[in-house]
Amino acid sequence: MKKTFIIVAMLVCLVCACVVLCACSSDDGITVEGVVWGFDTASKVSDGKVIECSESNAEFYPEAKVADYECSAADGRLVIVNKATQSKIELTYSKIGNKTTKEINYNLKNEDGNSGMMVVANTNYADGHSEKTLVVSYDGIVYYFTERA
């Protein structure tokens, strides 16, 4: 019962994070390209459980494996590389949705036709700072990246 509650709580947190990402953003300078993306977490779509996290997030997700991913986007191609294993996810992306929104949504596809989605936005925090945020949902995993200086 406790495990089910934790899973449901994680799913609620993931949904809330996506809502906050969309609602608390600004459309100034939103772009997926030309940004150095730093990995934060990877979670399962099915239950919201964080399965991998950056070293800086390890204390918050003690059951997650510490991992490091590199993410880059250019000319309609998104590449996510696991730095330890060198395994790659290579996807093409195309913008969807209305340009007046405060985030940019994209469809993703690999060369086999498998699809996913991603969203990029500027997340503004109560203390006044903001950062670009990238959420990629592909193959049953949600990858969360933030801009690195």
Image (cartoon, rainbow, N blue to C red):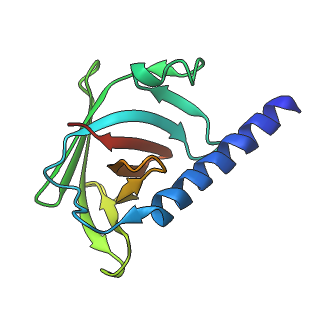
**From the viewer's perspective, is residue 15 above or below residue 52?**
below
Q: Nearer the viewer, residue 81 or 59?
A: 59
Q: Is residue 87 left or right of residue 62?
A: left
Q: How many marks?
A: 0
Q: Is residue 72 above or below residue 75?
A: above
Judging depth in this view, the residue of 84 and 125 nearest the camera is: 125
> Residue 135 at x, y = what percent?
40, 51
Residue 128 falls left or right of residue 94: right
The answer to whether 98 is drawn above or below residue 84 in the figure is: below
**Residue at the (53%, 29%) spot, across then down:** 51
Out of 29 and 15, give the one closest to the viewer.
Answer: 29
Instruction: Say which residue appears at 42% left-offset and 42% top-offset.
Output: 143
Q: Quadrant of the C terminus?
A: top left
* Drawn side of residue 66 relative to residue 61, left or right: left
> For the point 35% across and 59% down, which residue is it?
121
Provide residue 5's location: percent of width, then percent of height: 81, 38
Viewer-closest of 25 and 74 = 25
User: How far across and how far down the image is residue 32, in percent?
Assistant: 23, 56
Figure quadrant of residue 55: top left
Lateral position of residue 147 relative to residue 40, left or right:
left
Point out residue 45 in the picture as x, y percentages from the top left corner.
Answer: 57, 47
Q: Residue 102 occupies which quadrant of the picture? A: bottom left
Position of the N terminus, as image quadrant, is top right
Residue shown at the point (47%, 57%) measured from the top left:
21
Quarter-of-image position of residue 96: bottom left
Residue extending farthest to the front is 127
